[in-house]
Image: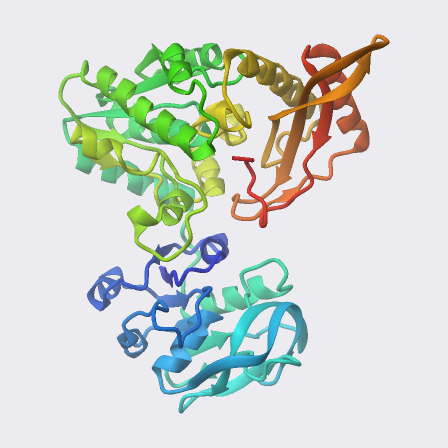
Amino acid sequence: MILIIDFGSQFNQLIGRRVRENHVYCQIEPPSVDIDTIKSLRPDGIILSGGPSSIYEPNSPKMNPAVFDLGIPVLGICYGMQFMVDSLGGIVKKAQKREYGFAELVIKEPGVLFKGIDQKTTTWMSHGDSIDALPEGFTITASTENTKVAATVNKKRNLYGFQFHPEVEHTVQGRLMIRNFLLDVCGCETSWNMKSFAEEAIAQIREQVGDNHVILGLSGGVDSSVAALLIHKAVGNQLTCIFVDNGLLRMDEAVKLKTVFGRHLDLNIRFVDAAQLFLKALDGVSDPEEKRKIIGRLFIDVFEAEALKIKNVKFLAQGTLYPDVIESVSVFGGPSAVIKSHHNVGGLPEKMNLKLVEPLKFLFKDEVRELGEELGLQKDLVWRQPFPGPGLSIRIIGEVTEERLALLRKVDAVLLEEIRKSGYYKKLWQSFAVLLPLKSVGIMGDQRTYENIAAIRAVTSRDAMTADWARLPYELLGTISNRIINEVRGVNRVVYDISSKPPSTIEWE
């Protein structure tokens, strides 16, 4: 087990992914985690993440420096290395020349972390501070043109530091460096997999739930579906799933879900049609965060009303994933910035006085898919592209109306049909349409039109922490555009989104 300390890096989840790729379990905690908790977790190694702060700033995040006296190997990355150096008596100063982007790393002392690494290798830098003096016992193991201390080690104390980011794709041999730390320094075994996770999770759910009943809000997405199946395998009919049709779903979504979940998976499901309630509540609302909050609050009300009809319910199950937990600062307590609110994290248990069952809360998205396959979930559900909890409301920029929803559903249906037909569906992380609050002039049948613009978004990603726009073939884009304009009355222009994450997000709202 590896413990990752989150000092606010945008890449902290990516560090976790790199560890999990090696079939080693990891957990991310804020720097406020106390030493006794660290000892109780019994990590084989600790990784200190980077962060946007400078160590000499008054409110920069810090943790108990006693972590360096536990005899556990520690790898500090960027800010994490600077915290280590500062805590142990070294000096960190503002760099004379900031370093952002690619840099050639020259290895001066190979050592265990650089085993199998080229003597000169490309890395990714992102820092405005640098090490001016190392603490006693530390030596320089690598440098770049602008950074003398690009890597350091204290062999006696098993402490390591990288000024660059080995976790990002831009650091060409970064994966191997992390693997070297996990296996050769920490002695981790590559034994963590979804089969062992499922067995352990089922046993934990049975112990937690006992003879009581569990309710779960089933959306039909991968997360809630896998959570439902996992809990069903643990406690059977003690689980009741509640599916709330909020009127913001894709075309024929509710009908398909009734067939798949009710007939094929033998789950106990209650379907609630609340479409008109949600549409009325969203009337005139354009702000995306307000949309999310309205939908979240109303979902709680509808869900609670249905849940009260079920007897002996003591637990609420949620398909919360690790990125949701980490990004929701108010819940997690770490310094990472909130990108957007996650309405599936928190809120509901407090109102309903139920205990939480969150069997997926330490998993990343691709791991949830692996778990779904391990549990025998249908492949079309396992590999279903992510769909936001607020539904099409955040894919309609501006006000949500029945007319605009109907328009977007048709556009979305055409898009997904062509993406599936082309064989790109499983290759993409997400592909969807966005209805813009704009109209443009066009010509159809020799007549002037002034109609809506639809944007197409398709991205590739491993876990949604970073994403790149998909280089779909021109022929496919042409077919999609042609079909939308010809078949969806009210759209006369289609544009393609070619922005990546970061700086953009995957969803537009």
The count of marks equals 0
Q: Residue 499 is drawn in which quadrant?
A: top right
Q: Is residue 333 above or below residue 446?
A: below
Foreground pick, 484 / 317:
484
Foreground pick, 79 / 26:
79
Q: From this viewpoint, is residue 290 visible?
A: yes
Q: How is the image coloured?
A: rainbow
Q: In the image as oriented, which residue stretches furthest toward the right?
A: 446
In percent of the image, x 49 and y 15: which residue is there?
253
Q: Residue 297 is drawn in which quadrant?
A: top left
Q: Position of residue 489 (x, y in %)?
A: 68, 10
Q: In the image as oriented, which residue stretches furthest toward the bottom?
A: 136
Q: Is residue 194 above or below residue 152?
A: above
Q: Residue 110 is drawn in which quadrant?
A: bottom right
Q: Is residue 426 above or below residue 399?
A: below
Q: From this viewpoint, is residue 77 visible?
A: no
Is residue 445 left or right of 324 when viewed as pictured? right
Q: Position of residue 6 (x, y in %)?
A: 38, 60
Is residue 433 left or right of 310 when viewed as pictured? right
Q: In which quadrant of the rendered image does the N terminus lie?
A: bottom left
In percent of the image, x 37 and y 82: which residue is there?
157
Q: Is residue 407 above or below residue 287?
A: above
Foreground pick, 465 / 109:
465
Foreground pick, 350 / 460:
350
Is residue 254 left or right of 385 when viewed as pictured? left
Q: Position of residue 85 (x, y in %)?
A: 41, 81
Q: Position of residue 361 (x, y in %)?
A: 34, 42
In percent of the image, x 41 and y 86: which residue is there?
90
